[in-house]
Image: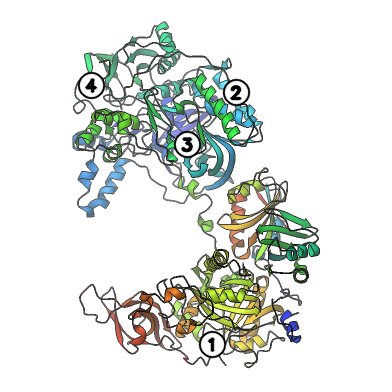
Amino acid sequence: MSEVIANNEVASAPVLIQQMDQLSSQGARAESPLYHADLASVAREGNQNGGVVLQEVALLGHLVLRGNINNAGFTSGVEKVLGMALPGSLQSAENGDVSLRWIAPDEWLLVVPGAQAFSIERELRDAMDGHIAIVNVSGGQTVLNLSGANARDVLMKSTGYDVHDRNFPVGKVVTTTFAKSQAVIRRTGEQSWELIIRRSFSDYLWLWLQDASAEFGLTVRT
Amino acid sequence: MTQQNRLQSGGRIERNKPLTFSYNGKHYKGFEGDTLASAMLANGIDVVGRSFKYSRPRGIVAAGPEEPNAVLQLGATEATQVPNVRATQQELFDGLVSNATNGWPNADMDLMGYVGKVGGRMMPPGFYYKTFMYPQSMWESYEKFIRKAAGLGRSPLENDPDTYDHLNQHADVMIVGAGPAGLSAALQAARSGARVLIADEQSEFGGSLLHSNELIDDKPAAQWVEETVAQLSKFSNVVMLPRSTVNGYHDHNFLTIHERCTDHIADKAPAGQVRQRLHRVRAKWVILATGAHERPLVFGHNDVPGVMVASAVSVYINRYAVAPGKELVLMTTNDGAYQTALDWAAAGRKVTAIVDTRANPQGDLVDAARAQGLNIITGSAVIDVQGSKRVSGVSVASIAEDGSRVTGSIQRLSCDTVASSGGWSPVIHLSCHTGSRPKWSDDVIGFLPGDTVQKQLTAGSINGEFGLKGCLAEGTRAGAQAAINAGFEADADAVPASAADVKTGPAMALFHIPHSQPTSRAPKQFVDFQNDVTAAGIELATREGFESIEHVKRYTAMGFGTDQGKLGNINGMAIAAKSLNQSIPETGTTIFRPNYTPITFGAIAGRHCGELFDPKRYSAMHKWHLENGAKFEDVGQWKRPWYFPKAGESMQDALNRECQATRESVGILDASTLGKIDIQGKDAREFLGRVYTNAWAKLAVGKCRYGLMCGEDGMVFDDGVTSCLGENHFLMTTTTGGAARVLEWLELYHQTEWPELEVYFNTVTDQWATLTVSGPNSRKLISELTDDIDLDRDSFKFMDWREGTVAGVPARIFRISFTGELSYEINVQANYGLHVWEKLFEAGEKYNLTPYGTETMHILRAEKGFIIAGQDTDGSVHPFDLGMGWCVAQKKPFSYIGKRGMAREDCVRPNRKQLVGLKTKDPQVVIPEGAQAVNDPNQPIPMTMLGHVTSSYYSACLGHSIAMGFVRDGLNRMGDTVYYPLADGTVIEAEICSPIFLDPKGERQNV
C-alpha cells in the first residue's frame, strides 16, 4: 500500500520521495486515454484491409527516468534492474516486454507491463544512487502502434521529422511535433512505428489519424 | 459542335477519348490530353474574358502559367466553385463546367464594354486611387463596383466538400522543373544514390520537349522524355511529382509545392481521395530548372483576340493538334520564333508574313523559313492590329534599326492570327523568393538569377541558355554537382544527351514597338493585359514623377493581377526605363514573392480545419460532462465544463443553483486541467524558494502551501498550491493556461542560472485526474468512500494532504480550498478518474452532490476574494498591488525572482492601482468586467480613469452583486464611492470594500 504510511511507522527515516502504487488493488475500472473511442467495436466492424493499421496498447506502465549519464549510480542501476544499458541519443532498447527510449540528454522513457510499474520503480530506486528522478506517468499517456504499407505516409503528413529509412532506421526514437500536438515516435519494424501520445491530446490525435489515413483505409486492431 | 481548329493528326491528345465540357453554358467537345485552353481554341472560342478597366474582349495568348486572359471560373456545383483558374493549366475532364470570370453581364455581350470605350480616356493609371479615394465613407460601395467589374472571380458560398493535406518531404536534391535541364539533372543525381525530388507544374514531365520537333540522342524529344521518366521511376531514391507547382522557395532550402492530385479528373475529388496536397520540402541542395517565358511584344491593339505569344502557337499545334487560326503574321526580334511559322506551315495553314524587326536576320531557322519560301519582311514591325473580337489584319511598317521609330509607309496585311516574340525571360521567380536580386544580362536580354545564399544551382533556360543542347549539358552538370555537394559520389564529367547545334543570329533588344503616332496618341499598346496597363500609362506615370519601378508598378497596377505580371512586367520595366532615359539595370526590377501561381485555401489549410483546426484537450471525465449536459468553455486548448444547466434553466439560474448547492451541501468540480509539475531532488525546496515569492524552507512533509510566482520585473504571472510529498519531492500546481509556461520557466532558470541545484521537473498534468469536492458535506461524502484516511478535522487539517484509497483507487487528497468551503482535492491516476467520479455521484446523491463548472468556480472564489492569475492580473501588478503582501517573504537567505523588481521606485510609489472589492449601490446591478472607475462621473471626457473591474458576478449566496477591480490607491480608500460610466450613458455607483465578501475569518474552510 502506501509508502508514506509505511515509512511513517519507522520514525527515524524521513520520507525523501513519496512512492505510490497507483494501481487499484480492488479491481476498479481503469480507462485508457482512448477508452471512449471504443476501438474494439471499430476493430470488429471497420475496414479490415486498410493501408494503415492502428492499435492502442492500453494501460501499460510508463516511467520517466531522469539522471546524469555520467552518474554510474544511475546507469548501473538501470542495467542491473532492466538487464540493458540506457540507450544513447535518439536510440531505444528492449528486453522482453520492457522497453527504454532516449528522450533527452537526461531523460528516458521506460515502458513496462502495467502491473509492474510500481515494483520496477521501487527496484530501480533501490538500485540507484545519486541525483535521479523517477516519475510514474502511466495515466498520462498511451501507446499507439501504427503499421501497414501506408504508415509512413501518415507519419509524413503528421510530422516534419524525416521518417525515411535512411534517417529513421528501426530502433530509432524521436520526440517531436505530431500534427499540432506531440509524440514520441519509435520505429519498431520495417512497416511499424510506435507513437506515445499524451492523454489530453489523445482524442485529437485519434481524429487526426483517422483523417490522415482515410485515403489509404484505416484498420483498427485490438 | 465541331472542333474546327483541330488538326487531323499529331499532338499528345487521345483522339479515341472524347470529352465534353461547357463554357458559358454552351457544350463543346475536346479530347483527353487537352487543356481547357487548347479545347477552347480547338472549338474556335476567341473571347474568354473582358479586360479589367476598358472591358475589351480578350482571348487566349499563352499556353502556360503566364496566361493573363483565360482566367476562368470553374465548378459544376456551388460547393466546388473555383475562381481564377488559368485555362492553360487546367486539364480537360469530362463534364468540366467553366464560365468567363469578368464579363459583366457576359464576355461576348458586355455592357461595360460600352462604358469602357466611352470612358476609356477618363481612366488613366491611378484612376482608382484618384477617383475612388474620396469620400472615404463611400469606399465600400466603390469597392463592390470595382470588384464586380474587375472580374476577380467569386468564391463558393458553400463549404468545400474536398479534403486537402500536407506532406513533409526531405530530399538531398530537389529539382524544380522537368524539362530537358531538370530531367538531365534528375538522372545524374538519381544515379549517385541521392534522394531526389523532382516536381513540375505540367500534367506530364518534359517541359518544352512536349511540343518540340528536335531530336535528342537521335530520337524524337518526346521519346527521350518517355525513356528518361521510365528510367527515373526505377530508382527507389527518386520521387516524381507531376501536376505539382513549386510555389515558394523559402529560407534554408525550404520549398512549398502545390500538387493538384485530382483536379484533372473532376471538380470534386473521387471518394476517399485528397484533392490537393501541399508538400513542405526540406532539401539539402536545390536545382532550379524552371525554364523561361516568352515575352510578347508591345504594339498597337496587341490585345485583340488572335494575338498570341509565338511559342504558345507552337504548343497548341504540336502538343494539342490545334491550329488556332488560318492565316498567321509572326512578328519577332529573334530567330527562335521562326519555329512557330514553320510549325504553322507544317500544319497546312497559311503564313502571311514573318515580320522581323531586324534588318538582316541570319540563322538556321531563318534559312529554313527562307527555304520554304515564307514571306519574310525584315527591318519592320506590326504597329497596329485590326479587328475587335478577332484579328482581321495588321498594319506593318519599316522601323529604324534601333527600333525607336517608324521609318516607312504602312502596309496592311490580312490575317486572323498574330504571333509575337520579343525573346525569352528566364523564370527567376523562385530565385527571387529567397531574397536574391535578379541581374540584367544584355546578352540574354533578360534578368538572370542573382547571387544566392541558398544551397542552390540553376540549369537551363533560367540561366539564359535557350538552346536544347546547352540545356541538356547544364542539367547534366548541375545534377551531378548537386549530388556531390550533398555528399554523394557522382560523375562530374558525365556526358549529356546529344542534340543538334542550332546556329542562331543575334536577337534585337526591343520591347515596345513604335507607332507613327507618339505613344500617348497611338492605338492602345498593352503591357499588362490583366490590369489594362498600357505603354502610354507607364509613360504617363513616369511623367507624373514616379521614377522607382516599385512606384510605377503600384501607380499603374502593373503586375497586380493573378498572373503577377509574368507576361508583361519586363516589357513594362523596359518602357519605364526608356521613358526615364536610363538602362534597364538602372531602372531595376520588381521582385517576386510566393506564391508563384495562386493556390487554394484548402491546400494551405490542409487537414488543419474543422474539428482538427486546433487540438481540443479533454480530461478523463469529459464523457460524463457531455452526457450530463455541460456547456463548455475554452481554457487554453482545454474544453472545461462551464456550467451544467438543467432543463429550462437559464445560465444564471444554473449558476445560482450550483453556487448554493456547494455552499449549503456539496459540489464537485473537475480540476484535472490545472497544471501539475512533479519536482524531485535534494535541492527542490531551495528551488521553490527562489521561484516563489514566499518561504518554503519549513514546509513539512504532508503540508501544502499557496505561492505566487513573479517575473524578474516583480509582476505576478502565475500562482498555485505546492505540496510537500517528501523531503526531496514536491507537487506544484499551476493555472490551467499557464502550465507549459511555468514548466519552461522552471527549466529556463534551472538550466541557465542554477544548474548546480539538483532537481528534476516533470509534467504530470495529464497523469492525475483532479476531483475537487467542496462544501460543508464534503467530509461526510468522502468518508463513505475511504476507509484508510483519517478525515478528522484535527488530524487532517486545512492545507494538509494525505495518501489513501478512494473508491478502491490509490489517491492523494489535498485539503485545500478555492471556494472557502471545507474542500478536498482528490487526485487519482487519470485512468481511474471517471470511475472515482461516478462513485462519488453514487454516494453523493443523498447530499445533492452538484457538479459545477468554471463559472461557478469563479463566483465562489470571487466571494472569497481569491484572484485568478491572468484575469485579476495582467502582467502589470505585483503582489502588494493585489493586497497579497502576506505572500512575500522579506527574509529568505537567497534572493528570489521578482524581489528586486518589486523594489523598483515605480513599484513602491504611492497611488498605484490596487485590487479592491466593489459593492454596487444597487445590489442587483452587475458592473461589466473592464468598466473603468472614475471619481466624478460628470467630469468632461476624457475622464481620469482610476482602474478597471477585473471580476464581476452576481452572488446568489450573498444576494447581491460582487466585483473586484483596480482602483488607484484603492487599499487606502475603503468606504469611498467610485463611479463606472458605461458606454450607454448610464453610471454605476459602487463602494470600495474588502474583496473578501464571504466569511472573512475563514471559518467555513476550517471546520
Name which of mark 4 and mark 3 comes first in the sequence: 3
The correct choice, above or below, for B387 with respect to B539 in the image is: above
Which element type, helix, strand or loop, lies under badge 1? loop
Q: Quadrant of the C terminus of chain B?
A: bottom right
Mark 1 and mark 4 in contact? Answer it, CB < 8 Å.
Answer: no
Q: Earlier in the sequence, mark 3 or mark 2?
A: 3
Q: Badge 1 sits on which subunit?
A: B
Q: Are marks 1 and 4 on the same chain?
A: yes
- The residue carrying pointer 3 sits among few (fewer than 14), some (14 to 19) or many (20 or more) residues within 10 Å by Cα, namely many
To which quarter of the image does residue B823 belong?
A: bottom right
The residue where tag 1 is placed is B821
Give the residue drawn at x 75%, y 68%: A128
Q: Using the image as rendered, state which of residue B188 and residue A105 is in the foreground.
A: A105
Quarter occupied by residue B750: bottom right
User: Which chain letter matches label 4?
Assistant: B
Toward the front, the furthest residue is B893
Which residue in the protein does label 4 denote? B515
Mark 1: few, some, or many residues within 10 Å (few <14, many ≥20)? many
Q: Secondary structure at mark 3?
A: strand
Q: Is B223 left, or right, of B460 in this rendering?
A: right
